[in-house]
Amino acid sequence: MFLGTHYQRLDDKGRLILPAKFREELKDGLVLTRGQEHCLTLFSLGEFEAVHEEMRKAPMTKKEARDYLRVFLSGAASETPDKQGRITVPQILRRYAGLDRDIAVIGMGNRAEIWDAPTWERYLSETEGGFAERDDEVIPGIL
């Protein structure tokens, strides 16, 4: 399970050292793709296969579904961490997420997100207040 916030750095070759707590789950490979709010989403291979299987059920006659699949899958990249736990973040994805040097890798349970660290800090400061003050159900049956 992916939990917590981990601050990392991209090297000059666009490589990211995965948080140590994530490496075991990702050692056999992972998929990076575009996420919402201009971050990247990182899936283990098994989780990506499950998500993709659900996506295959989307009606091809629905334009919104085709648009989403095109953007989501056209940027997807399969990576296998090296012995130091590094992966290369493709240029197209670095550009999409505005990744420069300082990175925040945040756990999202079944996946992780990769953010430009200053963008993550801004997003978090803008949304934490609403989270703390929420008094209605956001996720039905859970919270």
Image: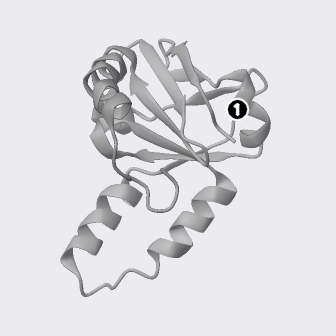
Q: Position of residue 65 (x, y in %)?
A: 29, 73
User: Where, quadrant-wise, is the N terminus in this rendering?
Assistant: top right
Can see residue 110?
Answer: yes
Q: Position of residue 78 (x, y in %)?
A: 57, 48
Which quadrant would residue 101 be assigned to in this image? Answer: top left
Instruction: Choose between 71 and 14: the one closer to the eye.
Output: 71
At label 1, counting other C-alpha atoms closer than 10 Å, the crowd grade (few under 14, some 14-19, many 20 or more) is: some
Which residue: 34% across, 49% down?
Answer: 136
Which residue: 51% across, 12% down?
Answer: 11
Left-right relation of 15 to 80? left
Q: Which residue is mark 1?
A: 22
The residue positioned farthest toward the left in the image shown: 63
Q: Is residue 30 above or below residue 115?
A: below
Q: Is residue 122 above or below residue 22?
A: above
Q: Is residue 48 above or below residue 20?
A: below
Say what amino acid the circle numbered 1 marks.
Phe
Secondary structure of the residue carrying tag 1 is: helix
Q: Position of residue 79 (x, y in %)?
A: 61, 42
Left-right relation of 25 to 95? right
Which residue: 33% across, 38% down?
Answer: 134
Instruction: Choose between 14 and 66: the one closer to the eye.
Output: 66
